[in-house]
Image (spheres, rainbow, N blue to C red):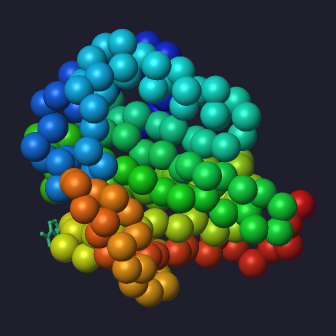
Amino acid sequence: MRPLAEEDAGGLCRAYMRNREHLRPWEPRRPESFYTDRGQAERVRGQLEERAAGGMVPWVLTRGREVVGAVTLSDVVLGPFRSAHLGYWIDAECVGRGLAVAAVRVACRVADEQVGLHRIEAGTMIANQASQRVLAKCGFDVIGTAPQYLHIDGEWRDHVLFQRILHRRPPG
Ligand SMILES: CC(C)(COP(=O)(O)OP(=O)(O)OC[C@H]1O[C@@H](n2cnc3c(N)ncnc32)[C@H](O)[C@@H]1OP(=O)(O)O)[C@@H](O)C(=O)NCCC(=O)NCCS
């Protein structure tokens, strides 16, 4: 697991093409341009700009030259809120080995120690029991259910919202 870099665009394109069906039930509908080197290069550039502005912390999981997963803290807000949203996926060939749990734990540690966050929020579709298990194992608690929370695989889907409080220290 390492920070996203500009040269990951090709690996991400191949990973999203390989995992199109695996990710389809849990992700927004993507335009065809998403599955191209150029589309991924633009997306990666946008994410790196957002990281430089302090709004996002994106990582990739790699095996050799291939990307086999991603973890992202997005919507990073500081001040008295000090919160971000967490997202992640693991290549279909690599699931069931504890990679998501390990990666989310690293993201939580960096969020606390380097980004200065107090809280991380994550939402999973009600049917996504694997993802709910990942969050439970990483110390996240259920906040509640948000009806029609995100537009996923062509529909507004209800989500179970989770949060993890990282510490009790005051901001700053
Ligand atoms: C969800 C996902 C990230 C999990 O990745 P992973 O590397 O397999 O996760 P881990 O191996 O670290 O842990 C998965 C846990 O869920 C459990 N699990 C897997 N499938 C499950 C299911 N259908 N029902 C209940 N638990 C399940 C595993 O047994 C494991 O728990 P355990 O360690 O107690 O046995 C991966 O399946 C994925 O990328 N799915 C598609 C994208 C996605 O859903 N992203 C998250 C959106 S919120």
Q: Looking at the image, which residue is at 25% across and 62% down?
A: 155
One can see residue 2 in this view = yes
Q: Nearer the viewer, residue 46 or 70?
A: 46
Q: Quadrant of ligand 1?
A: bottom left
Q: Looking at the image, which residue is at 67% across and 43% down?
A: 55
| 72 in relation to 131, above or below | above
Q: Looking at the image, which residue is at 30% across and 27% down?
A: 34
In this view, which residue lies farthest toward the front?
Answer: 155
Q: Looking at the image, which residue is at 57% across and 65% down?
A: 120
State the image quarter where residue 130 is shown. bottom left
Q: Quadrant of the N terminus?
A: top left
In this view, which residue lies farthest toward the right?
Answer: 172
> In the shown orientation, is residue 118 left or right of residue 143?
right
Could you say where residue 127 lies in the image, as x and y percent from the top left? 19, 73
Q: Quadrant of the C terminus?
A: bottom right
One can see residue 159 in this view = no
Could you say where residue 26 lies in the image, as x and y percent from the top left? 24, 56
> In the shown orientation, is residue 53 left or right of residue 50?
right
| 102 in relation to 18, above or below | below
| 40 in relation to 124, above or below | above
| 68 in relation to 6, above or below | below
Query: How many circles with numbers are drawn on the protein?
Result: 0
Could you say where residue 138 lies in the image, as x and y percent from the top left? 42, 69
Q: Nearer the viewer, residue 23 or 34?
A: 34
Q: Nearer the viewer, residue 72 or 33?
A: 33
Could you say where residue 46 lies in the image, as x and y percent from the top left? 55, 27
